Amino acid sequence: MPSDAQQHPHINPWIVAVAVMFATFMEVLDTTVVNVSLPHIAGSLSASVDEAAWALTSYLVANAIILPMTGWLASFFGRKRMLLGAVFGFTAASFLCGLATTLPMLIFFRIIQGATGGALQPLSQAVMLEAFPPRDRGKAMAFWGLGIVVAPMLGPVIGGYLTDNFSWRWVFYINLPVGLASIIMTRLFIFDPPYLRQQKRGIDYWGIGLLALGVGALQVVLDKGQESDWFETPWISWLAAISAFALVGFIVREFTSKEPIVQLRALGNRNFGIGTLITGIFGFTLYGVTALLPLFLQTVLGYSSLDSGMAVSPRGLGSLVAMMLVGILVNYVDGRILLACGFAGFCYSTFLLSHINLGISMWSVAAPNFVNGFAGGFIFVPLTTMAMSQLRKQDIGNASGIYNLIRNVGGSIGIAVVTTMLVRGSQAHQNYLVANVTTTNPTARALLQGLGAKFLGGGADAYTAHREAMGLLYQGVQQQAALLAYADNFRLLGYLSLICIPVIVLLRRLRHRPEDRIEISGE
């Protein structure tokens, strides 16, 4: 079946790549750019920070529900029409978010933004994979991957700058020019392939309902679990149970329905099934690192939002360099070797971060971040290319939705796990350290005497000096306990990266034939 690019030979596939890149970058950026603005949003809309956090949760829930349905929606409405509607809806919702005068209004528009944004990643990925011949898909995925990998890194920097220098509303208004450019380019340069225009499908209402209930409830549990003490809170337990039953029902429904909304049988494809598993673990580790490091810099070292964003921004530069390099190497080097190098580098960078201390310089944060981003580029491109390699073109849209959903859910699980372990680990280390702060411990006694002497020298009486010295000593214990908990989490993420390396062997190697078709070795 001729591809879209073949039907319109006057359209350079790189123009198509730029068109979908705008949409992808805009959507992924918005998942992180709002985070640093929450306190300002809460103050402006007369809400608490916890209440304002629902502006993040509502977006993630709507986004997660739509992701796996994108393939069906594209076949039902047409891919170009669906992509145009998603970009227009996302852009319009961004503008309305900036105009919101109450928190419920903002949450409502964020739901629309999340729902329309959820379709952008898989749609743009499917368009890219079809626009380029198999031999050039590595380069195409490298270019597309820049939006996926770099945007979350730039989000805190851009969000911090706009919020500090203008207003939190500009965090949403910044999407308008990018969205308009994407709408124009999509309208001019993207077309539906014939097989999509020929499909007429029914509506799997039960599948839609179970998917929305299961994924939506799961996302709320992951986002609010630590804040609500997990299963000690009844409503979290109920939502977790509802999510489990709904997802099991959804899986049964999709395997028994004549016209399922999500083709789960695609997971039976060896490369796609293994690739999806690996991308879920990669999402866990990637989002875990991106969540931990800004927290450490701001809460322990006292960095501002902008300084924190600048310290982690070299990750984006590392990704940029790696994407350009791996886009070429993927045609000449076994993708499994590139993946193994990527995960080994990712592990090395997290082990470097596990050696953090309270006197660490910004360079000591920036260097591991560059390595982390560089390693991520060596994972993203070959993994995406190999996972999609054995699928028919008409199955790529559906598979992209599943693939992106698993990566995002893996990321949500990663953030939930590391934040929980951070709180619990800090408490455990604090209990251990406090047990050693006694008058019989020579080091603790010397510190206490030294601090007390400073307060006595400042004119305080003996009781006040002792109390103030104990307060400072306890504050130091808390900082050290938090430091140890962060180091534990970085090591955990490093070990998880290593687990992926033996799994990579199960992927089948790609071989390019002269006629530019993909052949899978071992078949």
Image (spheres, rainbow, N blue to C red):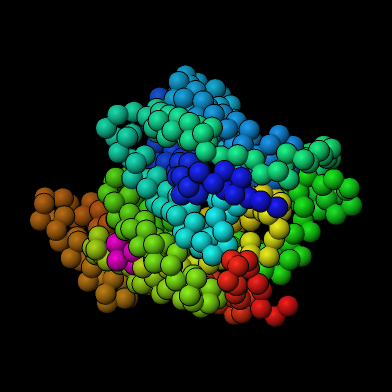
Secondary structure mostly taken by the magenta-highlighted segment of the chain: helix
Q: Nearer the viewer, residue 406 or 42?
A: 406
Image coordinates of residue 101 in percent, x first then y, are 47, 19
Tell me which residue sits at (73%, 62%) in the image.
267
User: In the rendered structure, which segment of residues is drawn in magenta?
Assistant: 365-370
Q: Is residue 36 above or below residue 510?
A: above
The residue sitting at 46% across, 25% down in the picture is 95
Percent coordinates x, y for residue 416 in the rendering: 56, 54
Going 42% across and 73% down the picture, which residue do you hit? 345
Q: Is residue 388 magenta?
A: no
Q: Is residue 382 above or below residue 148?
A: below
Which of the image's four quarters has the C terminus?
Answer: bottom right
Q: Is 307 left, or right, of 123 in this rendering?
A: left
Residue sitting nearer the eye, 424 or 348: 348
Task: Determine which quarter of the picture holds residue 79.
Answer: top right
Q: Is residue 276 above or below residue 509?
A: above
Please indicate, yes or no, whether residue 335 appears anywhere in the rendered image.
yes
- In depth, the one of 332 and 351 nearer the eye is 332
Residue 366 among those drawn in magenta: yes
Residue drawn at (77%, 40%) of the image: 198
Q: Is residue 390 left or right of residue 105?
A: right
Q: Is residue 300 visible?
A: no
